[in-house]
Image (cartoon, coloured by chain):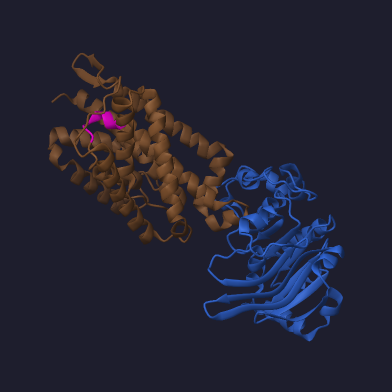
Chain colours: A brown, B blue
Amino acid sequence: MNLTQQLVNGLVLGHAYALVAIGWTVLLGVARLVNFGHGQMYMVGAFVTWFAIAQLGLPYLVSIPLAMLVGILIGLLVQRIMLQATIEQNLVSIMIMTLGMGYVLHGAAALIFGSTGQILETPLSSKDITLGDLWLTWQDVAIVLVAIVEFIILKRLLDRTRIGRLVRMVAEDPKLAELAGVNIRNVYLGVFAFEGAAVALAGAMVGPRTPILTSMGFEEVIMTFVVVVLGGIGSVLGSYLAGIALGLFTALFGALISPAYTTAAAFLVLIAVLVLRPGGLAARAH
Amino acid sequence: MNSATRSGQGITLEASDLKVLYGGNTALNLDRIEVREGEVVGVVGANGAGKSTLVNALAGWSRGAPKVSGQVRLDGRDISRMPAHERARGGLLLVPEGKLIFGQMTVDENLSALAGTVAASGRRVYDQQAVFELFPRLLERRNHLGSQLSGGERQMLGIGRALMLGPRVLMLDEPSIGLAPRLVSTVLQTMRTLASTGLSILLVEQNVAAAIDVVDRLVLLERGRIVAQGTAEQMRGDPRIAQAYLGSHHG
């Protein structure tokens, strides 16, 4: 086994996890919402990108915003339907509604795109980089760069802008935010639009790494869950670090022990961390 | 008498037939309450008399889920069906009891969150500078997180945030709770200063002794109803006020 290669794989995989998870981080941190249709929204993002490139002949750079637009529309639609449950913070209803929405998306995608696997090929995914023994694609490089840029933008947006302040107000205390003049419905809608755009972007970026199927999404939502909880719910930096840690863990575990048990092992790590540090890795000691 | 002539007399906030139900229980049942321009009205009464319920209902807000009926008018305009955030932006500001600032945001961020987004025609919208002039203590603490502030500083910050939305009517729920006596008088004296600029103030207080020195009128609530009201002078001698005043020593 080539350890350096596994570290590179782990870093790429980690940035992919972080990219897939970023929308949920904001969702859970701000709106105290869960979205178990997250994996299917990722799938739709990958398929819209594939459709735009392979069927419509659009360039990759046009296909990505198109997929994000579809993601935003799905996010807005879902949130509009769940708005009352959101405001009441009825988590059980939201969980069931988003699970059901995932199945609807899966069915709709199978109808539109067919249920055979596809390869999402981009101008970057077939271009290799070899450095001595090391091998990766330009798509991998793009995943790392896009993840880093997206996390930096998100962090600055939340910390330094008016929109970020509104989002943090709603995250901390939605009732008090109302008294401060914030229309919390709009914030909730905006957060779900971001979730839709972010996960579709992830689909467009990470989808090319593996064959895509309309039945996929389960592993993405599980890994996202691990990343978001490990990182400390709602912590942007925590999610980024947790994504990388999980990527390295998965790559090394797969190489050293067995790739068959990586998801189970990731969950074991999650449980261990929650027992030792209930607030997640990024939680401050009080 | 219709509401148009009433607002001609300088009434900024008025409510009529205001009823609030929690479950099946009536928490508030008021025929009428009003606040005039530049007036400080105190609302006093024992615990559970409905003081917080009253200001919350006026603000269209609650942490629970009560049933509210009745009419609320701000400058003669019916706002009964407006959600809380629109009432706030319309100039009816509530500084609630308990958690009243954002603990994970700095003083600056708390103040400037929505500053400059309100089109407040004819209302004085404070900027950060003016809030710091009113409460110099906040200027010293501007980069601290809300959670690091003392009780008095939190009150100042809550009031400052409200001022930056250009209030027409400012409602405060128990601003003196947990404050040192010196700070109580600072906060309450600020109410007089603000009222002198034409702002209407509705002040919920359990500390009747402190409140009676700064209010123009006092309203005594008991079991969700107004049982006595009058000018501060009239109410000073009222035995029910004396009783409530004594009660506050034990509370």
In the displayed structure, would residue A136 be above or below residue B70? Answer: above
Which residue is rendered at x = 19% and y = 34% of the image? A117
Residue B56 is drawn in which quadrant?
Answer: bottom right
Residue A249 is drawn in which quadrant?
Answer: top left
Residue A206 image offset from top left, x and y in percent: 30, 31
Magenta-drawn stretch contains A211 = yes
Residue B244 image offset from top left, x and y in percent: 71, 81
Residue A211 image offset from top left, x and y in percent: 21, 32
Q: State the extent of the magenta-drawn residues as a range.
A: A206-212
- Please identify the quadrant where the N terminus of chain A is shown: top left
In the displayed structure, would residue B126 be above or below residue B171? Answer: above
| Residue A258 as seen in the image, left or right of residue A25 | left
Which residue is rendered at x = 36% and y = 43% of the image? A231
Q: Nearer the viewer, residue A115 or B148?
A: A115
Which residue is rendered at x = 37% and y = 60% of the image? A93
In the displayed structure, would residue A270 be above or below residue A209? Answer: below
**Number of numbered tags placed on the structure image:** 0
Q: Which residue lies furthest to the bottom in this view?
A: B239
Residue A71 in view in this figure: yes
Q: Which of A282 and B126 is in front in this view?
A: B126
Residue B210 in view in this figure: no
Residue B111 image offset from top left, x and y in percent: 65, 47
Q: Which of A227 and A85 is in front in this view?
A: A85
Residue A221 is drawn in which quadrant?
Answer: top left
